[in-house]
Amino acid sequence: MAKSGKRRAPLWARLSAIFGCVLMVVAGGTLVAQQVLVSRYAGAVETGNLLGAPAANAAKPASDIKGPLNILLVGIDPRTDEQTPLSDSIIVAHIPADMKQAYLFSIPRDLVVDIPPFEKTGFKGTRTKINAAMGFGSSVGNGKHDVVQGFELLAKTVQQLTGVPTFDAGTIINFNGFKAIVEAMGGVTMTIDQNVKSEHLQPNGKPRPRLSRCADNSCAHPYYGPQAEYKKGTYHLQAWQALDYVRQRYGLPRGDYDRQRHQQQFIKAMAKQALGRDVVTNPAKLDKVLKAAGKALIFDGGGHDIVDWAFAMKNIRSDEMTLIKLPGSSIINNGNYRGEELAPSAEDFFASVREDRVQDFIFRNPEYINNNAA
C-alpha cells in the first residue's frame, strides 16, 4: 500500500456530511465497507429535478464532474404540501478548477432582488425578498405546493443575482433532518461568538407560547415568556439548541448577517464532527448518522448520483473550506424595514466566482473572509 503523509478518513464516513453539511469527502477504507454503507446512504437520499434540467441529461460518466463547480444549498423549515415553502437559508458553494478547496457564501434571505418570471406557475416576476422565490415557483394547483419545483425558480433567481450561468448540483436541506443528524452524532461542539436570546424556544427547549392576538401571523414578534439563551464561548450543544441558535436573527446587531455567520459556523462544526473519530470508529453511531443524513436531503446532481459527487469531492476537507461574508445593509424607508441590499463590491465578488478567481479576490479583499466562522 502506498504511503501518504496524512491518513484519510473513509469515504463512507464522510458521506454523512456531503451536501447536508459540506461538500467534502476523501477516499479510503475497505472496498466492502464502502460499497455496503455507500449503497445504504445513497439509497436513502431522495432525488429530484431541482435544477429543471431535462431527463435526457441523466446517467453521465462520473469523470465528467470537473471544476470549477457551483452548488446551491437551500435550507427550509418543515412544510406540508399545502403550505407555501420559504428558503430560510441559501448557501452557494464554489469549487475551483483544482477541486481542492470550497468557498461558501450565504445569500441573505431578506435580500431584495428581481425574481424572474416562471412559466410553470404563470408567475410574472416581481421585485421582493429572495426567500419568496421558492414560494412563487412551488404552486402545482389545488392549493398544493412542491418544494422541488420551487427550488427551480429560486435557482434561476440566484443565477440572475450572481451571474452564474448554471448550478452543477443542488440540494434542499430540511432543518428537522439536520436536527436528526446532530442527534445521531450526540450533539455538536461549536463556538458561540455573541450572546443570543431565542425568539422561538424556552430554556427547556419547548416552544414559547404565542399571543392570541397574533394567531393570524400578523405580529412581527408573536411569542412571550422565558427565552432560551446562548452565551459566548465554546459548548457542546444538544441538537435542539444548535438548530435554535442558528435560526435566530432578531435582537442581533447585524440581524440576518449575524445569522448567516452562525449558520456557516454550524455547517463547519457539524462537518468536522461528522468526520471525527467518535463517529468514524463507532459503527452504530455512524449508521444512525448516515440514515439521518439520507432523510434530510433532496438532491440533484445534474445527471450524477451522490456517490459520483462523493468521489469527485475527495480532496476537500473541512479545514479547506473558506467561509465568505457578503457585505450589505438594511433598507429602511420612512422608518420601516424593507429588506437587505448588498454593497456594490459584491458584484466584483460574483464576477470572481464566475471567472474562477475567488482566491485572488479574497487575497485583495481579505475583509470578505469570515474569520469568526472557524
Image (cartoon, rainbow, N blue to C red):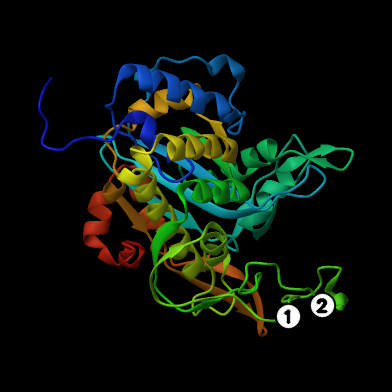
Q: Quadrant of residue 292?
A: top right
> Left of 20 or right of it: where is 95?
left
Contact (CB < 8 A) between labels 2 and 1?
Answer: yes
Percent of width and height locating residue 186: 47, 52
Residue toward you, 96 or 282: 282
Q: Measure the C-alpha gap from mark 2 to mark 1.
A: 7 Å
Where residue 224 is drawn, which disc sits there? 1
From what the image shows, is residue 347 above or below residue 167? below
From what the image shows, is residue 331 above or below residue 109? below
Q: Which residue is mark 2?
A: 211
Percent of width and height locating residue 221: 72, 77
Q: Amino acid at mark 2?
A: Leu
From what the image shows, is residue 179 above or below residue 15? below
In this view of the protein, can residue 309 be seen by the observer?
A: yes
> Left of 234 or right of it: where is 19?
right
Q: Earlier in the sequence, mark 2 or mark 1?
A: 2
Residue visible at 42% across and 39% down? 70
